[in-house]
Image: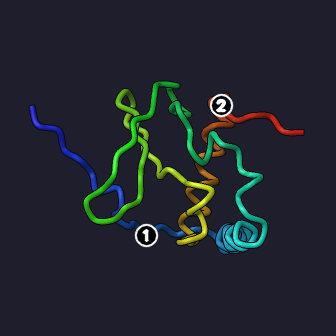
């Protein structure tokens, strides 16, 4: 049985309320101004899946040199964000993606509690 690999770098358009878009733009600006030192390592370069806790395996696409992480158990996929290369291409989608990773970690108990 052949496995079908999705193009993880394909873009999709979604509609969000104006307040969500404006908040996402604020996050993007904060990332650019403040840097990535306050972002937990489990968001930037996690070792385990935030959903099922299985090991994440790295892979690269043919089109670009972005590195991704994929869970072979549940299929969860995310970009690996490097502190060194983070701001070479920070865009709104990256800020949203990082927020979603953090949210999944919090929902499934993987995020560190910071005081």
In the picture as drawn, the residue positioned furthest to the left comes out as 1
Determine the image quadrant of residue 87.
bottom right
- Relative to 26, does residue 6 appear above or below in the rendering? above
Q: The N terminus is located in which quarter?
A: top left
Residue density around tag 1, few if under 14, some if 14–19, many if 20 or more, within 10 Å: few
Q: Locate residue 89 relative to residue 42 in the image: left or right.
A: left
- Relative to 70, does residue 108 appear above or below in the rendering? above
Q: Locate residue 90 relative to residue 38 in the image: left or right.
A: left
Q: Which residue is mark 1?
A: 13
Q: The C terminus is located in which quarter?
A: top right
Q: Is 20 or 100 nearer to us in this picture?
A: 100
Per the image, label 2 sits on a secondary structure element best described as loop
Q: Locate residue 11 relative to residue 93 in the image: left or right.
A: left
Residue at image point 76% right, 72% down: 33
Q: Nearer the viewer, mark 1 or mark 2?
A: 2
Q: Earlier in the sequence, mark 1 or mark 2?
A: 1
Query: Which of the labelled discs sits on residue 70, or is there none?
Result: none
Q: Are marks 1 and 2 in contact (CB under 8 Å)?
A: no
- Relative to 71, does residue 53 appear above or below in the rendering? above
* Percent of width and height locating residue 95: 61, 63
Per the image, label 1 sits on a secondary structure element best described as loop
Residue at image point 17% right, 38% down: 3
* Percent of width and height locating residue 36: 70, 58
Q: So how many labels did they put on this image?
A: 2
Residue density around tag 2, few if under 14, some if 14–19, many if 20 or more, within 10 Å: many
In the picture as drawn, the residue positioned furthest to the front comes out as 84
Q: Is 13 or 40 nearer to us in this picture?
A: 40
Q: Is 75 or 30 nearer to us in this picture?
A: 30
Q: Which residue is mark 2?
A: 110
Residue at image point 23% right, 47% down: 5
* Percent of width and height locating residue 68: 42, 49
Residue at image point 71% right, 66% down: 31
């Amino acid at each position: 049985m052949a496995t079908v690999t999705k193009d993880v770098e394909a873009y999709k358009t979604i509609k969000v309320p104006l307040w969500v878009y404006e908040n996402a733009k604020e996050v993007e600006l904060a990332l650019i101004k403040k840097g990535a030192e306050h972002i937990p390592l489990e968001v930037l370069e996690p070792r385990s899946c935030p959903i099922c806790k299985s090991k994440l395996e790295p892979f690269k696409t043919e089109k670009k040199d972005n590195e991704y992480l994929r869970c072979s158990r549940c299929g969860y996929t995310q970009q690996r964000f490097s502190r060194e290369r983070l701001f070479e291409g920070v865009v709104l989608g990256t800020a949203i993606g990082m927020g979603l990773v953090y949210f999944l970690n919090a929902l499934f108990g993987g995020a560190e509690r910071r005081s």
